[in-house]
Amino acid sequence: MSKAVILIADHYQDLEVWYPLLRLREASWTVITAGVEAKKNYAGKNGYPITVDTSVEELDPSEFDAVIVPGGWAPDIIRRNQTALDLVSSLNSAGKIIASICHGGWVLASAKMLAGRQCTSFSAIKDDMIHAGAKWVDQEVVVDRNLITSRKPDDLPAFCRAILEAAKA
């Protein structure tokens, strides 16, 4: 069975947290939600709340097969948390699944893991991704080794399929 952590901060894109959370649990994954500020209740961009399971400070990266970075405005908060960046970097270095959608690419840029990687994101941060060294493309899902990226909520079915496929590999 696979285990994933979804990084949470206020103003997360509601669907980009809840769709993967429920889809992966449906596929028998253990999915943990981790807040970057504390173990508390966070508000989604559209007002949907989530009470996280833990905080990023309490996580052991070796326990996870994947990290999911949802979009909304939350990634701008997440990228300022060094523990969250260290978690993403550690999982990336171990070849674990790094899955990012929408503005989640900001976290990947701040974790300095995009140089030479092909990826996508919400179009508004295309330049940020390119400046971080990414080869940006406009596709619903892009898989570059252990990195899985998508653009927006409409891409969630392809995004989750790619995560599940990568876990089988």
Image: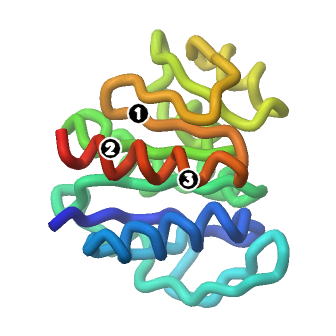
Alpha-carbon span between mark 2 and mark 3: 17 Å
> Seen in the image, is 51 located left or right of residue 13?
left
* 119 and 22: which is toward the camera: 22
Which numbered disc covers residue 157?
A: 3
| Labels 2 and 3: the sequence-earlier one | 2
Residue under label 2, please give it.
97
User: Residue 85: horizontal and vertical position, in percent?
Assistant: 46, 47
* 54 and 166: which is toward the camera: 166
User: Pointers 3 and 1 in contact (CB under 8 A)?
Assistant: no
**Three-letter code, disc 2:** Ile
**Three-letter code, disc 1:** Leu
User: Pointers 1 and 2 in contact (CB under 8 A)?
Assistant: no
User: Residue 50: horizontal and vertical position, in percent?
Assistant: 61, 85
SS label for mark 2: strand
SS label for mark 3: helix
> Seen in the image, is 131 located left or right of residue 30?
right
Alpha-carbon span between mark 3 and mark 1: 17 Å
Q: By what rule are the colours in the image chosen?
A: rainbow
Residue under label 1, please give it.
147
